[in-house]
Image (cartoon, helix red, strand yellow):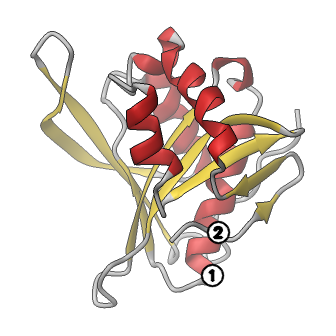
Amino acid sequence: MSLPVLTGPRVTLRPPRTSDLEPLHAILQEPEVSEWWVGYTPERVRIELIDSDYTNVIEVGGQTAGVVYVIPPADAEYPTTIAHIFLGTSWRGSGIGSEALALAVRHQFAHGTSRVTLDPNAGNLPAIRAYERLGFKRIGILRDYQLRPDGSLDDALFLDITRSDFPDGPALPEVR
């Protein structure tokens, strides 16, 4: 189930609309995004993002800027949420991605999740630095985790943030 509409100083997280398909596909074709989010056709965007209960579109000033994908806990005994995020390159470095992720994490913590995890490609250093600035901690390496277009396997870095470390969730980044 997607999050309810969440609003921060600059970001709105909302469920996807059919009209998001084209802008999300365009973002996923940007070289800096498609390096990590591989092989997204319009059909795959529709199936995995538009028609998904886990997709939360990042909207800024009425424009589609990316997605926070949130998979809430399936079992009350293991209150961990899995998150993924991508952002259009024109929004990078603005704090928009951090604000969107902070909104999602804060909402999850407020609704019983004790831990949110991320698993970026280990080579995606700018994303990893942004997650760590938000409060995520390195847990370990997931070896041979992502199949690359050339058939090789890349590692991922497993990170998490816990409600015990941030009871109210991570702080929203300052507006730049």
Q: Residue at x 68, y 75 (%)?
A: 168
Q: Residue at x 43, y 71 (%)?
A: 72
Amino acid type, mark 2: Arg
Q: Quadrant of residue 149?
A: top left
Residue at 89% in and 52% down: 9
Under tag 2, what secondary structure?
Answer: helix
In the image: residue 118, left or right of residue 164: left
Up the image or down, 175 lies above or below 5; here it is above
Residue of label 1:
110
Q: Could you say where residue 170 lies in the image, as x and y percent from the top left?
A: 65, 61
Q: Residue furthest bottom?
A: 76
| Residue 45: % across, % down | 45, 36
Secondary structure of the residue carrying tag 1 is helix
Near mark 1 (Cα within 10 A), the count class, few <14, some 14-19 or many ≥20, is some
Identify whether 33 is placed above or below 106.
above
Q: Residue at x 37, y 76 (%)?
A: 73
Label 1–label 2 contact, CB within 8 A: yes
Q: Which residue bears the numbered disc 2?
A: 106
**Amino acid type of the residue that numbered disc 1 sits on in the rendered structure:** Ala
